[in-house]
Amino acid sequence: MHQLTLAEIARGLADKKFSSEELTKVLLARIVQLDPQLNSFISLTEDLALTQAKAADARRANGESGALLGAPIAHKDLFCTQGIRTSCGSKMLDNFKAPYDATVVAKLAAAGAVTLGKTNMDEFAMGSANESSYYGAVKNPWNLEHVPGGSSGGSAAAVAARLLPAATGTDTGGSIRQPAALTNLTGLKPTYGRVSRWGMIAYASSLDQGGPMARTAEDCAILLQGMAGFDPNDSTSIDEPVPDYGASLNGSLQGLRIGVPKEYFSAGLDPRIAELIHNSVKELEKLGAVIKEISLPNMQHAIPAYYVIAPAEASSNLSRFDGVRFGYRCEDPKNLEDLYKRSRSEGFGPEVQRRIMVGAYALSAGYYDAYYLKAQKIRRLIKNDFMAAFNEVDIILGPTTPNPAWKLGAKNSDPVAAYLEDVYTITANLAGLPGLSMPAGFVDGLPVGVQLLAPYFQEGRLLNVAHQYQLNTDWHTRTPTGF
């Protein structure tokens, strides 16, 4: 049962081959048995899962149907879940139980999805390796000595290891697509505003976006269908009709114009990954796509712009965690200033502290114009590059990451080296575009992803291309040894 995709689970439940309760018990037992190797879960919600599974079975017995009705999933541990710990991978929120469900959680629960637990993540979603979590690093199931990517590394590792078929993630600078690439999954970052951020604990509010992580594009379509939609509680949510993502999967790629930016194939890209990306291009050409070289001239400025904007927004968002209202509070503070200082210095880990300090500096008097304002202008130039490119092509294709997964601890002494792993993903967040990573092969036994970018609200186009590619390749079917 653990090898079934979401689509296969939906068919199996509809055909009464098994019940949601039976499937849930199998997967919970599997998590208990195997997750100690991976550390992909922060909290298991056995009682909730079994209650939801029984309710889903009862709904099906009453004639209801639906692709997510009775399907087991997990949530990245920054989606608020009522009465359940929502830690954000931080000591600061280790004791926080959310008083309400995030919109994404509520929508998926209403569709009948079964929540098995909350997955591990980089603290407050800050990281590219899932090593900054208060609960310890997550391991990559393809090689337990390597990182799974971050910050949605817990969701990625759990799905890759077949502990469950799909999970939610969030993407601020590549945190769905990068771990998907490093663990052989399909991961989709929707258009900014497509999925509600209400109840999703913020890192950088103008960049964060929730999305699905699964083994196939078909499963991502199913999960996105349940997540997407306008939410009046979220001021950044866009009132745009949600199409039937499943219906778009089987369209022909004949005549589809795919742009390959020349800037992607620079000295920083592992040549073995470059070869796999070129192989993917050839595969799509066989399916009728037309390939064109394009240019994104301002891509070189993306990392410096991102690492001004994201920390600036983080320093503002994280100012609420002061030891007064909720979260961690230091012992025996001498006065209010001591309460603030020690609660924050003891509650936040080093990566979060680093980004708060960078962000506070960028926003400080005398430096706002020199750093933050300039970064926002570069952001606009990057968006303009994409708008010009999409006048010529329908999809942009390239690598998701410049390297395969690195060894645990290999970049801990050099944070900038880890930041550079986001070079291909952060531009989509800066521009607000949808992006998808899909499996494209292996280097030294470690998975490699190819990234697709599309114009605003064209998630269906991304899922269509990925699905057609997956019908003609088998990379996404490979399973890590031992799982």
Image (tube, rainbow, N blue to C red):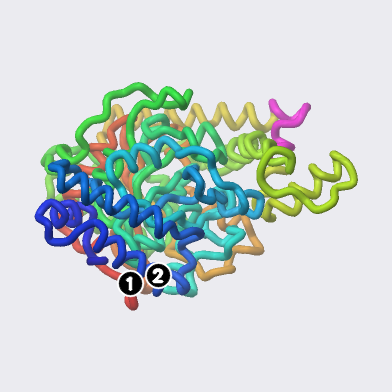
Measured as percent of width and height from the top left, residue 330 is found at: 78, 51
CA–CA distance in space, label 1 to label 2: 6 Å
User: To which residue does mark 2 refer?
Assistant: 141
- Above or below residue 133? Residue 304 is above
Q: Residue at x 60, y 58 (%)?
A: 132
In x, y percent, where is residue 380?
Answer: 50, 27
- Left or right of 136? Residue 8 is left
Judging depth in this view, the residue of 379 and 124 nearest the camera is 124
**Residue 38 is covered by the magenta coloring:** no
Is residue 460 at all visible to an observer of this figure?
yes
- For the N terminus, the quadrant is bottom left
Which stretch is magenta?
359-369
Helix, strand or loop: magenta stretch: helix
- Identified by mark 2, the residue type is Pro
As rendered, which of 368 and 183 lies closer to the eye? 183
Classed neighbour count for the residue bearing mark 2: other residues with Cα under 10 Å, few (<14), some (14–19), many (≥20): many
Check disc 2 and report its element: helix, strand or loop: loop
Whole-percent x and y of residue 134? Answer: 61, 59
Disc 1 is placed on an element classified as: loop
Q: Nearer the viewer, residue 193 or 423?
A: 193
Q: Residue at the location (75% across, 31% down)?
A: 364
Q: Which kind of residue does numbered mark 1 sit on?
A: Pro
Which residue shows up at 48% across the image and 70% down it? Answer: 146
- Confirm whether residue 438 shows in the render: no
Residue 241, above or below 319: above
> Which residue does the numbered mark 1 point to in the structure image?
480
